[in-house]
Amino acid sequence: MNRYIGVFVVLALAGLSMVCCSPGGGRLFVEHDYSYEGHFKDYKSFNFLECEFIDSTLLCSDIQDAIRHQMEARGYRVSNRSPNLLVSYNIFRSDLRFRGYQQPVIKDWVVREDDDATYKRIDYNLDEGTLMISLIDAETYQVIWKGYASKMMRNPNFKNNYFKGIVRSIFDQYPLMATNNGSSGYGR
């Protein structure tokens, strides 16, 4: 298998789909993909790319606060100077066709970094209101992990901290901890 296929094209599914209840009582589909090109043992810090939601700074603030909380809970620190990871997020306001891949569980792959690991393509039809969070290697500008939740806009009663539970559900799919003194850890 060619390990150097562009990360924007080759993302791999890890684990089984997680379905949980959304704040509106509907079903929220949560999943994630990761890249074999990620250097997960080396990441310690992060910062955000600019928010693309021109129509709502409150929306940007709520999502960024929730993501920051989850990253810091995993031991990553915010860095304005040379972060290891860049965080990007987007809400798709219409249905979305998305390609994912089934592959080894991310924390198992990080331990072995098996160059011969395989993957199987899976196509998804995600509903409007999908929140997608991407972790990007700041040195290579390649997406190394994506987590996404679909059907989250089904709740018309957005309140403060609405995204906190949704972002938590997405980051439950990312069990890795930031490196500390050259070692990496795993959560949960």
Image (cartoon, rainbow, N blue to C red):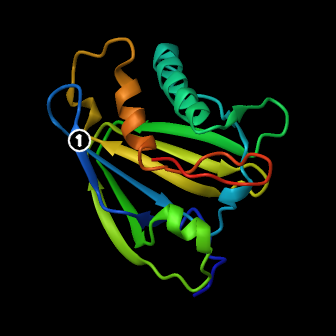
Residue at the image point whose x is 80% and y is 29% from the top = 80
Question: Would you place residue 163 above or below residue 40 in this image?
Answer: above
SS state under label 1 = strand
Tell me the amino acid under the disc marked 1.
Cys
Viewer-side residue, 42 vs 139:
42
Q: Position of residue 81 (x, y in %)?
A: 85, 33
> Splitting the image into 4 quarters, where does residue 144 fall?
bottom right
Question: Would you place residue 160 above or below residue 176 in this image?
Answer: above
Q: Residue furthest left?
A: 25
Q: Position of residue 12 (x, y in %)?
A: 47, 67
Residue at the image point whose x is 61% and y is 40% from the top = 87
Q: Is residue 162 visible?
A: yes
Quadrant of the image for the N terminus?
Answer: bottom right
Q: Position of residue 151 (x, y in %)?
A: 25, 39
> Splitting the image into 4 quarters, where does residue 101 fall?
bottom left
Which residue, given by chain and number where applicable, does mark 1 sit on? 20
Q: Position of residue 88 (x, y in %)?
A: 58, 40
Residue at the image point whose x is 46% and y is 20% from the top = 59
> Splitting the image into 4 quarters, where does residue 77 fall?
top right
Q: Is residue 10 visible?
A: no
Viewer-side residue, 136 vs 115:
115
User: Mark 1, residues whose alpha carbon is within 10 Å: few (<14), some, or many (≥20)?
Assistant: some
